[in-house]
Amino acid sequence: MYINRVGDADNPRFEDPSQANICRHSVKSHVEELAIFGGPPVFPYKLHVGRPNIGERSALLDRINDILDRRWLTNDGPCLQQFEKHICELIGVKHCVAVCNATIGLEILAKAIGLSGEVIVPSFTFAATAHALRWVGITPVFCDIDRATHNIDPRQAEEFISARTSGIIGVHLWGRPCNMDALVDLTQRHGLTLLFDSAHAFGCSYKGRMIGGFGDAEIFSFHATKFINTFEGGAVVTNKDELAAKLRLMRNFGFVGLDTVACLGTNGKMNEVCAAMGLNSVASMDTFIEINRRHYDRYRRQMAIVPGISLALYDEGEKNNYQYIVLEIEEENAGVSRDILEKILWAENVLARRYFHPGCHSMEPYRTEQPTASAHLPNTQWLVERIICLPTGSAVTSNDVASICALVSFVIENAAAVQERLAMGGFPASL
Ligand SMILES: *Cc1c(COP(=O)(O)O)cnc(C)c1O
């Protein structure tokens, strides 16, 4: 027997649905009570965005015990093989090549599929999408997004195709699918490789088909903060036999036998403990979705009535993992800017994140290498100033979510008084 800790999906005391509706409390009664002005924080503990889902602790520890008994710790072990097979079945894809993280996976994939020259990617993504390309000598060309979906704009992508373009990488941001029909059409017409960074999209679907089987290949991340995690990890999934074989070789130094090396390779292997965590994580997937969905529903209901704030919505006709609670703050109507709201939330121990501010094109080395990129990215520039992600997942309770909503509502309702107080200065947290 193992003791359940706070945050375990299998801890029945932690998330009691009967407690879920009793917390319509107001968290503050006066602006002076905000922690940023010296009041006590709403939360005595820190609420992180992307605090890991753990799943069944005892099942995980049993798996790890078995790994130790076998003394087979890495190199295509039984947990890894089972995990890969499981993913193939869940996604309905032919091949899954699990890797030590999605960034290395993307680098291996770029080499294996022969990307070169320029590859078009959205700027509004995590730095890894661009870095992985640049790390293997490819120039990421930053494309704008659609304001409504936050995903790559296929029309602008087409304008950026040059003689040096070898492919396009779409990112299913927040697990919401790219316009894949348009991207498939575009890449086919131009003879380009089409890949997807599906780091956010495990368990999500597009037109009823699971994400993972689109384009030439897709990449999942199983980093600790992601919906399904293997501590660190990722997987390249594809329906292409030859590509999968090449990925397997490159993941393991190019080895085909004990001492034959067939090609250039690297070490991208996922170890057994990580694969065991993956199996464990996938086994609790439905629970994680249920919790995320409950939190999302509450955020959706409570944010709907707050002026100047809109929540990124999931298409209920598709499968979603509901892993990201993403708000857009429109300062003109909210009365406070995103950055002020962020500072106020942090002071209350709600560690909201400005994902993905400021956009890859504004990060080094791209900022220096492509100084004029921002001119073509008006929607990205628009969004990076408005976006904020809030805590959700199995480490957050329904009451926590209710309190976060009450806090955001309070700040917006009292925006004028907050601004007045900020103008007076003399508060402890620096702005
Ligand atoms: C997390 C993330 C990655 C990188 O994944 P790792 O497994 O941490 O290397 C890549 N792209 C996006 C969009 C991500 O969110």
Image (cartoon, rainbow, N blue to C red):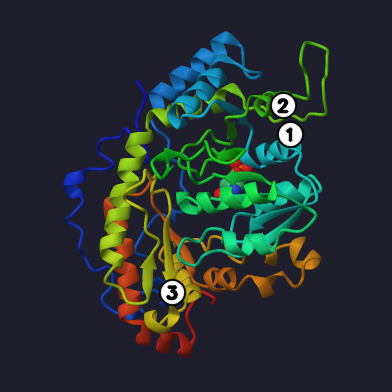
Foreground residue among 20 and 42: 20
Residue 17, labelled with which disc? Answer: none
Q: Are marks 2 and 1 in contact (CB under 8 Å)?
A: yes
Quarter of the image for residue 162 reads bottom right
Residue at 53% over, 58% down:
151
Quarter of the image for residue 344 reads bottom left
Q: Which residue is mark 3?
A: 36
Choose the circle earlier in sequence order: 2 or 3. Answer: 3
For the residue with label 3, is its CB less than 8 Å from the closest atom of ligand 1?
no
Residue 246, labelled with which disc? Answer: 2
Residue at 77% over, 11% down:
257
Q: Secondary structure at mark 3?
A: helix
Quarter of the image for residue 234 reads top right
Residue at 27% over, 57% down:
298
Residue at 58% over, 59% down:
154
Residue 426 lies, in percent from the top left, at 49, 84
| Relative horizontal placement of residue 282, taking residue 14 as reference (left or right) | right
Is residue 351 visible to the viewer in this orientation of the structure?
no
Foreground residue among 59 and 290: 290
Label 3 crowd bin: few (<14), some (14–19), many (20+), radius 10 Å: many
Residue 296 lies, in percent from the top left, at 32, 54
| Identity, as a three-letter code, of the amino acid under mark 3 | Ile
Residue 112, labelled with which disc? Answer: 1
Foreground residue among 197 and 343: 197
| Image: 289 above or below 49 | above
Choose the circle earlier in sequence order: 1 or 3. Answer: 3
| Image: 100 above or below 129 | above
Q: Are marks 1 and 3 in contact (CB under 8 Å)?
A: no
Is residue 250 visible to the viewer in this orientation of the structure?
yes
Q: Secondary structure at mark 1?
A: helix
Foreground residue among 113 and 7: 113
Q: Secondary structure at mark 2?
A: helix
